[in-house]
Amino acid sequence: MKVMIRKDYEGKLSAYVAKKDLEEPIVAMEKPDMWGGTVTLANGWELELPAMAPDTSLPITVNARRLSQ
């Protein structure tokens, strides 16, 4: 699914899923740089993100895979 990852003015990361009209903060990351690992959203969803360079600029839309139901 297409997910937009962005950082707000306070530096907090969030994910927006357009098909679900859902925007949730990212509350946990498997890897410190986020890319190539899983992230957990505030609503409990776990998303697997693609591997990308650690200095990838945000906001960015990526293909992510939802792991939890």
Image (cartoon, rainbow, N blue to C red):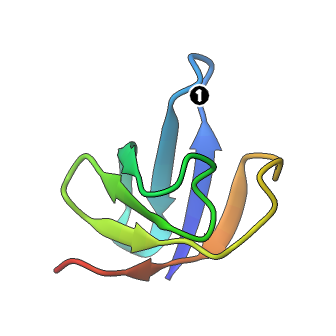
Image quadrant holding the C terminus, namely bottom left
Q: Locate residue 28 relative to residue 7 in the image: left or right.
A: left
Horizontal and vertical percent position of residue 47: 40, 70
Q: Residue at x 62, y 44 (%)?
A: 6
Q: In this view, does 10 lie above or below 56?
A: above
68 and 20: which is toward the camera = 68
Q: Which residue is drawn at 83% across and 47% down?
A: 55
Q: Is residue 62 above or below residue 16?
A: below
**Amino acid type assigned to the residue bearing label 1 in the image:** Asp
Horizontal and vertical percent position of residue 8: 59, 28
Residue that mark 1 sits on: 8
Which of the 4 image quarters holds residue 62? bottom right
Which of the 4 image quarters holds residue 61? bottom right
Disc 1 element: loop
Horizontal and vertical percent position of residue 7: 61, 35
Crowding at dot 1, Cα within 10 Å, few <14 / some 14-19 / many 20+, comes out as: few
Q: Locate residue 20 relative to residue 13 in the image: left or right.
A: left
